[in-house]
Image (tube, rainbow, N blue to C red):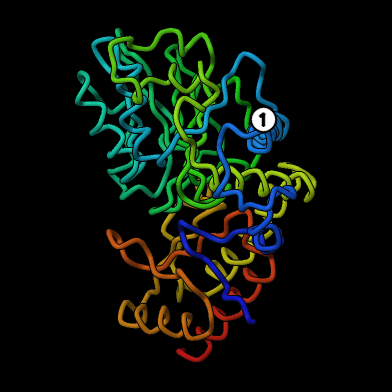
Amino acid sequence: MQRAYNFNAGPSAMPLEVLQEAQAEFLNYADTGMSIIEMSHRSQEYAALHAETKTLLRELMEIPEDYEIMFIQGGGSTQFLMTAANFHTKKYAAYVNTGVWAKKAMAEGKFFGEVYEAASSADHNHTYIPQEITIRENTSYVHLTANNTIYGTEYKAFPKCNVPIICDMSSDILSRKINVADFDLIYAGAQKNLGPAGVVIVIAKKSFLATARKELPTMLKYATFAENDSLYNTPPVFSIYMVNKTLHWIKKQGGVEQIAANNVAKAKLIYDAIDNSNGFYIGHAEKEYRSLMNITFNLADKELEKDFIAQAKAASFVGIGGHRLVGGCRASAYNAVPLEACQALAQFMEKYQKAHL
């Protein structure tokens, strides 16, 4: 079977090796005579998988021991609500507006108190990451979005603040090295770099968790997950299992450092095709803020964009159309997208350009 060149923005490409491993043991996990999706989350076999997944994550991300690791059902959008519900306990909460997902996070914050933009890139249609942020007194936290899937921008260095920092890393977690200790809470939906949709990874400083609002429904409290090893209720077993497989794969590739080097090389191929096109393709993001995960661009001739996307799809390039809110084109080169796929796309772009000059 010829597999597609998968550039979907999420759910997105997974390592072929991981899919094959899951396929091979789907009917009989760990010689139990059962599939992983059939067994109790209280079983010895699942308990071992659960613990190992946390250990792998702590090792690969170098997570300090004073941080909790939680697996929570859902995705990043639920975390927009949970972060505010737990930690918007002062007069204000601050948000850096770098695009659609940052604004959606801020909208949830409004349910628990006043919010404000500590900085924004809206003045230039989110083509950059603002470097100066303003924090008011009596601010609960500042919320950042590490990578912006729609506009194709990414923090290269994170700001330092005198308030707790919450960061949405849904689309670039484990794509590069970060210092976990620079953040008070990190969350990431799995369906871009870690596995299938259904689970969100939350990494939170224990001392920060202790400051959370107490009067909340049980399943909105981070404490419920932290104090019960994410096993208060049935966790998303299959999603966690696939995260486990993906973490093993990352370690086998050489860890986050090697993954980061691969991502730089992959993105360069496509950005070079844009930059060397003499204006045929136009990148959306300013060069110094370009995302390695989501490469966004337009064709100078807008009439050609639909044809370009259609021709790309016919050539087995999937997910090249831009987000429905902004249009244009987008290639999401997450960790599991192979170098060969990016080489093939760059060659297709060059060939398409030559055919339409």
Front position in the image: 155 or 309: 309
- Estimate how packed mark 1 is, as few (under 14), some (14 to 19) or many (20 or more) residues with alpha carbons within 10 Å: few
Residue 135 in view of the camera: yes
Residue 307 drawn at (x, y percent): 38, 84
Q: Quadrant of residue 175?
A: top right
Front position in the image: 117 or 149: 149
Residue 227 drawn at (x, y percent): 51, 16
Can you name the residue that lies furthest to the front here?
33
Q: Residue at x 41, y 8 (%)?
A: 211
Residue 252 drawn at (x, y percent): 79, 48
Q: Residue at x 52, y 68 (%)?
A: 274
Q: Is residue 113 left or right of residue 274?
A: left
Residue 345 drawn at (x, y percent): 58, 74
Q: Residue at x 54, y 16 (%)?
A: 205
Q: Is residue 258 left or right of residue 328?
A: right
Q: Residue at x 66, y 49 (%)?
A: 246
Residue bearing the label numbered 1: 51
For the image, the number of numbered tags is: 1
Front position in the image: 45 or 260: 45
Q: Is residue 95 left or right of residue 131?
A: left
Looking at the rendered structure, the kind of residue marked 1 is Ala
Residue 193 in view of the camera: no
